[in-house]
Amino acid sequence: CGIKINKTFMQGFCYPCFIKSPRTSECIFKPHLCRAHEGEARDMEWSEKYCLSEQFVYLSLTSGIKVGVTRATQIPTRWIDQGAVKALIIAKVPRRILSGQIEVVLATKISDKTNWRKMLLGNIGDVDFSTMREKMIQYIPKDLGQYALYEEEVQSFSYPVQSVPSKISSHNLDKEGEFTEKLTGIKGQYLIFENRVINLRKYSGYHIEFVFEE
């Protein structure tokens, strides 16, 4: 909303927006709790566009193999945002709650989170996505099996990274608001410097200035 605040909530929101905005609804982080299909939402017009629309369940390789969900309009942005080097769509559903129901089940078999340090270091083994797809689809509940996809191709991504600190520490701009250091890479949400990294998503809502020197 543009007001000046001393503290952000959930990636850049003020507290009133955090409580009222549809962008901070519980189902944003827990899709299986979405109630838009029942006519319950903070803003039904918004939910019709973002919750009652085509959604994908996918596998991605970040710090390891993981499962996730995203809107059709967020592909491939979502994968690049999380630093995935490979990704594969395994199901397409007509509304958000169904993607969440599939994700909840698959998350009991593989992770639904990313270890950001391991993702940045890039020390991860390859994964046979074709085999993993067959395995994960078997776990999709029978009443949702009609949404499984078998023919999607694996997508690969590379990032402009020259080097990564051997010991990765995340810089806190609230404690140290200014520093000078060489930028050595960008991967996912992170800017990588010689001795630190910054998760820019953490500072949504902040005004940050970069000064580049030759």
Image (tube, rainbow, N blue to C red):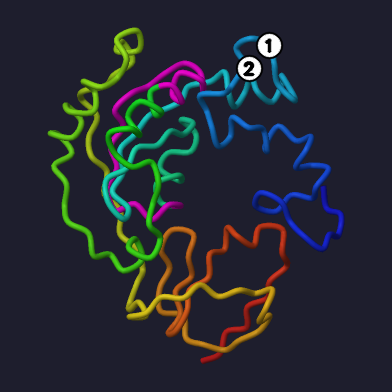
Locate residue 49 relative to residue 192 in the image: left or right: right
Which region of the structure is painted magenta? Answer: 81-101
Mark 1 lies on residue: 39
Vertical relation: 144 (above or below) 50: above
Identify residue type, mark 2.
Ala
The quadrant in which residue 207 appears is bottom right
Give the residue drawn at x 40%, y 60%.
Answer: 116
- Label 1 Cα crowd, 10 Å radius (few <14 / some 14-19 / many 20+): few
Closest to the observer, 2 or 17: 17
Q: Of helix, strand and loop, which one carries label 2?
A: helix
Closest to the observer, 151 or 44: 44
Closest to the observer, 22 or 116: 116
Give the residue drawn at x 41%, y 28%.
Answer: 104
Q: How far apart are marks 1 and 2 (CA)?
A: 5 Å
Give the residue drawn at x 24%, y 29%.
Answer: 152
Identify residue type, mark 1.
Gly
Q: State the mark number for residue 197.
A: none
Q: Do the residues labelled 1 and 2 touch (CB within 8 Å)?
A: yes
